[in-house]
Structure formats: structure tokens, C-alpha cells
Amino acid sequence: MNNPLRMAALGRAAQRAALALLALYVVAWGGKYAGLVLYLPYMINVWLLALGSLAWLAWRALRRRPFPATPFDLPLLAFLAAYLLSSLASPIPRLGLEQFGYYLACTLIFYLLVDLARAGKSLEPWLGLMLLAGAWYLFFGLGEVTAWYRRWLEIAPPGQWIPPATLRVDATIGHPNTLAALLNLLWPLAAARLAAARSRWLKAALAVYVLAAFAVLFLTSSRGGWLAAAAALAVLILLLALDRRELVRRCWAWLRAHAWAWAGLGLAGLLLGRALGALMLRQVQHPTHPTADPRGYIWQVAVAMFRARPWLGGGPGTYPLEYLSFFSNPPFDLLPHAHNFVLNQLGENGLAGAAATLALGAVLAWAAWQAWKRSAPGGRTLLAGSLAALAGLAVHSQFDLPQWAPVVNVLTAVLMAGLAAPLLPRRPAGVPLAAGNALLTAGCLALVVLSLLSGWGYTAYQRGVEALRAGNWPSAARWLEEAIRRDPSMPVYHLQAGVAYARLGMDDAGRATDPAALRKSIALTGQGLALAGNYAPDWAGLGMAKLAAGDAKGGVEALRTAAGLAPAWAEVRLALAQALEQAGQDAEAAALYRAALEMKPALAEDPSAPDTPLWREAAASPPSALPDAEESWQALAEGDAARAEALFKAQAGGVNNASAYLGLGLAQMQQGRLEEARRSLETSTFIDGSQPRAHAVLADLYAKLGEAAKAQAESARAAELLGISAYNRPAELGTRKGQWVLIYHRE
């Protein structure tokens, strides 16, 4: 082979390798939700988008490429305009601009793909590479369930092969619902290629892929994902049947000629449906699923936002802050979106965003119909897979917001580009070519500027966070103030800087060590709260700083605000009660101490709780941490261990009843049967590893058995779950910002 041919071959190989690495990066790391919030993938994405946008513009200029007009132009323009207007009208424009930049990037990726397709570059190899990269989640999903089951076999009683628990896998993507959404995009594409493949080896590989995808999808226990899979499967079967009518006629004729086949099919369907129904009924009992009103309580927040500001909504990215007005956080989880794409649009972007979304959906349906009519009968198999994947995503988007994962939007953009690229308008479809080119150029440049400016501020913030983690408070304060200088409208930068100065100004007991740093902390936290003031721990941190600075009245007011925002947060009531006791308001302090104990009885055993007369009196007779209303727990409290054991065994016959196994272990410990108690308590933590009491009891049991290392580990886990080191020490109250990532998309 001569040198030019060899160089061309090497160039093609390098191009394929680069595309394969890019597909793996998008699917397995940068395209996860982590790619929007974690610093390293975030910055890689920023530079990929910036350099990619500039390279695309240069390529278009050199090739004199026309604007890649599509039927989606006006709906996409309206969608982005709604995001931009809603952002500018939002109480927190900075959060809105972050969301606008994200969807602008997704839109530009769509136009890039259309442009490449019209330049003769097939999108099929890219889809194939993304399918191949998607095997990452099949591997880790099956590995996750294998490791889980092996752990069960280590503690299971002889002969009990089925665990008394269910598992929800996320396979490193971050959340089972996101995994389900991605799999529902991938498996229809793989199934369609299975139907179209001629090679036996390829058919076998794709069949394994589809079966593994269904297995992992089932184990996500995502109810929205299951409904989406059913919709995608129905659409795929229907479209393949319409495309292969002759085959359907032959199958129908054969069935009519063999009446016995109907009975066989009916029996097989009945058995399969019964088995699948039983498995799904068991799997859906996972403790993370609320049994009553699974989505209504989430949707009501978006509806309230829409009613308050119907035209432009509350602003992109403001749903989690509004959610905090409805539900106490801490201790309950914060939900970052409305779990319904249209409702989320109504709440955050008002009628403008919802109308643009529905228009986009209508044009997508029209484009799908045009693609179907344009394709030759018998050659629509791959198209059927694409349409089935989009149908599944549409259904899933009624119960979740999979679009928060960039990989979902990238795959959607590829499928939409495949529909739009052949639709060459005879004349500009709504957007003139010159205007389209100008908008495309402006969009690319805007994305570059927004991305680089955002990344510039995030870089300083990340260095501040790293210094905080290392305990270097002066360095943290300097970098966080630099982050504020670079990006002054991002609330979390002010709040985190307030934390850094609070650590400079207070010791672990909450006593002032640097008054100037405390004043700085109070000022910075106040600035952050002026930008976004719905998160209770931010107010708690402000209250503790003011108390340390000698402003008792201001500290109490801030703690009252925190308690009002999070009415179920026991620790903030403890801190407020301590402040009131020091101010001589004993009656209210005593009531708050009691309220804190009723919310969280385990506080009575917390060594970091306040050592004051009123607290000692309240903690001397705390409410029981056990559900005494149940007969089994009453028997245990009365010392009737044998009766309690029988009752707990009856309760443990179900699925995911960690409390029953905890009670069973306690009853067996009272009777001195420590090895049986070990198995019961290990089963309890296997079912639900978030129970501090179960870990504490297991630590006590390991100590009695002489297993000191295990006892120490379980004790540390119990302390971690109780939050002793994070919420109860005065200097650290309000400094644990676990939910900031869901509000501000920053670590």
C-alpha cells in the first residue's frame, strides 16, 4: 500500500477511534447528570462545547454551508426564547441562564448533526457507537445486582435463596430513573437492528444486549421507566407489523389453519403475564416508592408556581427552591424538578415554555409521519426503532425529567436529526436562510461566552471548596471571594464563602475567635440569602454566626426562620432552644427541646447535644425511638422476648421490612441467641442501610461477640447516619449543604 492510501486509512482509523472515545465519554461520564455539576466533567464539557462550536463555525465558513433549515426551527426558537425571557424575568436570573445555556447547547448539537447529515456524513455509525458505549451500564447494572446477591448469600439462612428485599440499580449513572430512561432509548434501537441484521453473530450479540437491557431496566424499579418500555414495545411491534404486512398476513393465515396454536399462545401469555406481574408487584415494593400519591405531591409545586406567574413562570431552575416552601428539608429529600416535563415547563417557564414544548412535540410527530411516508415499505425497520425510542421517552417524561441527563438529550438530538435531515424545504421554513445563519452564529458565540464565563467562576469556587475540605479556611475564603468577583450573581458562591469565614471566626463550640471574620461571614451569607433565601441550613448558619458574634436577637430570628422553613428539622429546634435558654426564655426553650426529641428521640443519646439544665431534664425521659404502638414492640419493651420474636417473625415474612428484622434481632439478643441475632440484624441493614439504630445495635452485638473491628465500623456508620458531626455541633450547624448540588448545580 502506498503512503497516501496508508495515511488515508490511518486517518479514518483515528477518526473512528476518536468518535468511539467521544461516545464512551458522553454515555459513561460527561453525559450523566454529574456532567452538569461535578467540576471535572463540567469543565471538560465546557471546553468541548466551546471548541466544538468554534470549529463548527469555521468549517461552515470555509465550506460556505447554508443554514440547515428544518421544520423544528420555529418551535426550537420559541423554546429557547421562552427560556431566555423567563430567565431574565426570574427572581434568580443566574439560575435561569444556566438552564438556558444547557438547552442552547442541546439545540446546537441538533443543528450540527443535521448539518453533518446533509454534508453526507451518516449518523448511523454514531448511533452504533452510542449503543456500544451503552453496554457500560448493562455491565455495571448486572455487576451491581450480582454483588448485592452475593452479599445476601453471605448472611442468608441455609436454604433461603430469595432475599427478603428488592434492589434498585443505578449502574453508576446516579439514579435508577435516569438509567431507565437511557435504556428505553437504547434497547429499541438495538431491537430494530436485531430485526434488520443478517449476520448470526450480530443477531446473537444484539439479542443478548436487548435481554440484558430489559433485565437491568426491570431492576431499576422505575415505574415511569416500565410504562415507557411498554409504550416503546407497543409502538415498535405496531410499526414493524405495518411495515411487514405480508409477513403478518402469512402468520395470520398459519394461525387460522392451526387452531391449537391459539390455545398455546393464550396459555403462554397467561403464564408469562402472571410471572411478570408477580415479579413487578414484588419489585415495586421498594421502600423508595411512596405508596400513596406517588407524583401528585410533586406536581402541586409546579402548579402553584404556574398560578403565581402564569405567563413566564417562576424562572428556570427555581423549582427546587419553591419545593422547599412546601416540604421540610432537612430532614426530607429535596426534589429538583416536577417529574413531568410539561408541568415543569409550566411552573418554571409558564405558558410560553409549555406552548413551545407542545409545538415542538407536534412538529416531531409530523416529522415522524413524513419520514414514515418517505421510506419504502419493508425498509422501515431502523426508523421503527427510532420512533419507538422517542415514544418511550415521551411517556417517561410524563413521570420524570430524564432530560436532566445530557446523554438523553444527545441521543434525542441524533434521532431528531435523522428525521429532520432529509426534509429539505423548497424555501426557508419560517426562518430565512440569512437570519438562520446569523442566529446559528450568535447561538454558538453566546454558548462559548456563557460556558467560559460560568466555568471561570466555577474554577475559583472549586478551589475554595477543595480548601474547605482540607480545612484551610483562609485559602478557602480567598478563593470563594474570587468566585464571587468572577460570578457575583451565583447565590451559592456567597453562601459558601459565608461558611468559610464562619469557620475562620468560630471554634468547634461556637465561640467567637475572630470577630472580623464573623462579620464577613454574616455579610456574605446575607448576600446569598438575598439572592435565594428558601434553604433552612443557610439561615441556620447565619443564626449560629450571629450568636457567636454576640447578636443574640439576630441569631434567634435567623434560627426561627430556619425552623419555619424546615418544620421537621429536629436539630435546628435544638439550637434555637439552646439560644433561648441562654437568653432566659426557659418556657419556650423547654417546649422546643421536647419538640426536638419527639422528632428525633435519638438526640437524647447524642454526646454533642447541649449540656444545659433544661436539656438534661428533657433528655432524661425522651420519647421512645421504637414504634411502641405495635404489639411486637410493646412486647419487646415489656421484656416478653419470646412473644415479641414470634410477632416479628410474622412481620418479616414480607418484603423490605427492615424494622421487623431489627426487632427480631433485639428479641433474640434478649434471649442470649447472639448468632441468630447477628443474622437478623445483618438482614435488617442489608434491606435498609440507612437505619442508625440498626447499625448501633449491630455494633453492640459485634462487641459482645468480640469482633472489635466490625463493632467500630458499625458504630461509626450509626454516628454518620445520626449526623452527629454535621448538624449538632453549634459551629457546624448549617454548614452541611448536601442539597446545594440540586439547587445550584455545584458541588
Image: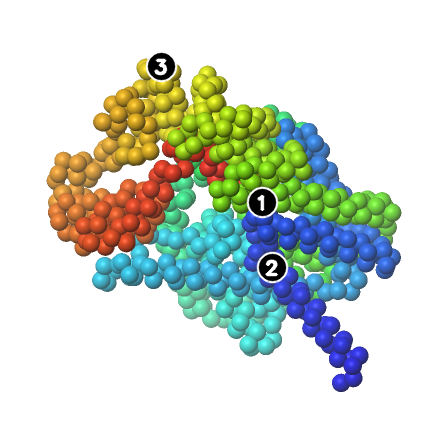
* Residue drawn where x is 63% and y is 50% of the image: 43
Q: Secondary structure at mark 3?
A: loop
The label nearer to you, 2 versus 1, is 1
The residue wearing badge 3 is: 585
Asked whether disc 2 touches disc 3, contact meaning CB atoms under 8 Å apart, the reply is no
The amino acid on which the numbered mark 3 sits, given as a three-letter code, is Gln
Quick check: 466 above or below 492? below
The residue wearing badge 1 is: 463
Q: Is residue 639 left or right of residue 337?
A: left
Residue 534 can be seen, yes or no: no
User: In front: 524, or 416?
Assistant: 524
Q: Secondary structure at mark 1?
A: helix
* Residue drawn where x is 46% and y is 29% of the image: 513
The residue wearing badge 2 is: 25
Tell me which label, 3 or 1, sits earlier in the chain. Answer: 1
Q: Is residue 234 left or right of residue 618?
A: right
